[in-house]
Amino acid sequence: MLCNHQTSTDITHGGKEPGDLIEIDRKTYRHWALFIGDGYVIHLTNDDDSSTSVAAIGASSASAVAIVKKQKLKDVAAGHVWRVNNSLDKKWKAKPSDAILKNAEQRVGEKIRYRLIKYNCEHFVTELRYGQPKSRQAQTAKLVAAGGSGVVLAGVLGAIVAALVSVFSPRTF
């Protein structure tokens, strides 16, 4: 459950600092981005023009290609609830913010192999902040599978895939 909720329109909240991780609640999964200042984030997403698309491009295949983009937080959040989440600071030391930002900016436009469990948007931003590509969502899915609850894992992954399919479906306006 998210706490300290911010809406996507509250982009001037004083709690965000450059280099902070932003967790966006998309109901069935969390999308992650790195706050870089002035209302912008850098995140791993699909290669279309939609700012609301997520990096869960692997919905129809084991892996796909994602792209690193710099976009307004309000556009990426697209009305979903978001919060600053640097909870891994308790486990790892964050890199200096200038190093995080320099590395993130250099990666904008880079195409990366996206794998739902092995390298997703959360892996990407934790690697930028801590030098460790970690995804608690992926770890949870792996733990459920290791515990013999394949049906639960299938349900969790099915919900993620369903959400992704809806994100990547053609839209008419």
Image (cartoon, grey):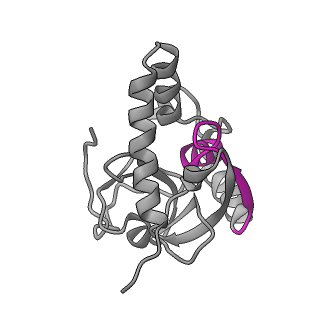
Does residue 118 belong to the magenta stretch?
A: yes
Of residues 62 and 136, the one nearer the viewer is 62
Q: Nearer the viewer, residue 126 or 62?
A: 62
* Quarter of the view holding residue 127: top right
Magenta region includes residue 71? no
Does residue 22 appear in this view?
Answer: no
- Left or right: 31 as drawn, with respect to 115: left
170 sits to left or right of 123: left
Q: Position of residue 34 (x, y in %)?
A: 53, 55
Q: Residue at x 31, y 66 (%)?
A: 8
* Image quarter of the C terminus: bottom left
Residue displayed at 44% across by 64% down: 167
Q: Closest to the observer: 30 or 4? A: 30
Image check: 27 left or right of 135?
Answer: left
Magenta residues?
109-128
**Residue at left 31%, top 61%?**
80
- In the picture as drawn, the residue positioned furthest to the bottom comes out as 173
Counting from the top left corner in percent of width and height, residue 10 is at: 28, 67
Question: Which quadrant would the N terminus be assigned to in this image?
Answer: top left
Query: Can you give x and y, in whole percent of width and height, for residue 54 in the image?
Result: 50, 59
Could you tell me residue 163's position as x and y percent?
40, 54
Say if 88 sits above or below 20 in the image.
Answer: above
Is 130 located above or below residue 99 in the figure?
Answer: above
Whether 169 is drawn above or below 147: the answer is below
